Image (cartoon, rainbow, N blue to C red):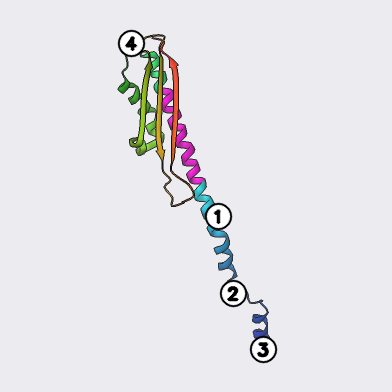
Amino acid sequence: MRARGRAGRALLGRDRRGVAALEFALTGIPVLILLLATVEFGRLLADQYALSLGVERAARFAVVHGSQSTLPASGSDISAAFYAAAAPFLGTTTSGVVVTVSFAPDNSPGSMVTVSARYAFMPVTALEAIPALTLSAAASYTIQN
């Protein structure tokens, strides 16, 4: 009689073996994907901040090192100031950054300097929903010295 009762319960869906594995399979994968997407979004924001900080500091460097200063800065000096400011945040990925320095009309006081940077952000996780993005930042100031 008892054996029949157990078999009857199994047929009625009361056997709970394997339910935890099924629940984990249904909820664990979406939670993992959400966690990875959060990490990638954080990396994206950090890289955008690094670009913004780098162009801001490089443009400020150019403002005080115009053609009339004791140590005038060239385009490569301004690019080096960008990399010095952005490298602690971008780490080893600074090799993919393209920095452009332009003067309008030249490096003399009263002229404009524009520093811009572009960077191809690539996700490190295997999430196909996050495409490769091109991040960019620019800063323009009037040369004072």
For badge 2, the amino acid type reads: Arg
| Residue 117, position as x, y percentages in the image | 40, 29
Which residue is labeled 1 in the image? 31
**Residue range of the region highlighted in magenta in the rendering:** 38-57
Tag count? 4
Q: At label 1, which amino acid type do we have? A: Val
Number of the label disc, if any, that sits on residue 66: none
Which mark is first along the chain, 1 or 4? 1
The kind of residue on which mark 3 rests is Arg
Position of 89 relative to 4 (above/below): above
Real-space CA distance between mark 1 and mark 2, rounded to the nearest whole angstrom: 23 Å
Q: Which residue is mark 4?
A: 67
Q: Give the structural element (helix, strand or loop) at label 2.
A: loop
Q: Which mark is residue 17?
A: 2
Label 4 Cα crowd, 10 Å radius (few <14 / some 14-19 / many 20+): some
Question: Which is more foreground, mark 4 or mark 3?
Answer: 4
Label 1: element kind: helix
Give above or below for 13 relative to 104. Answer: below
Give the label, 3 or 1, closer to the camera: 1
Classify the position of the N terminus by image quarter: bottom right
Per the image, the residue denoted by label 3 is 4
Tell me the CA gap for discs 4 and 2. Answer: 79 Å
Query: Which structural element holds mark 3?
Result: helix
Front disc: 1 or 2: 1
Residues at circles 3 and 2 in contact by the CB criterion of under 8 Å: no
- Expressed as whole percent of the image width and height from the top left, the position of residue 102 reads 37, 20
**Quadrant of the drawing holding the C terminus:** top left
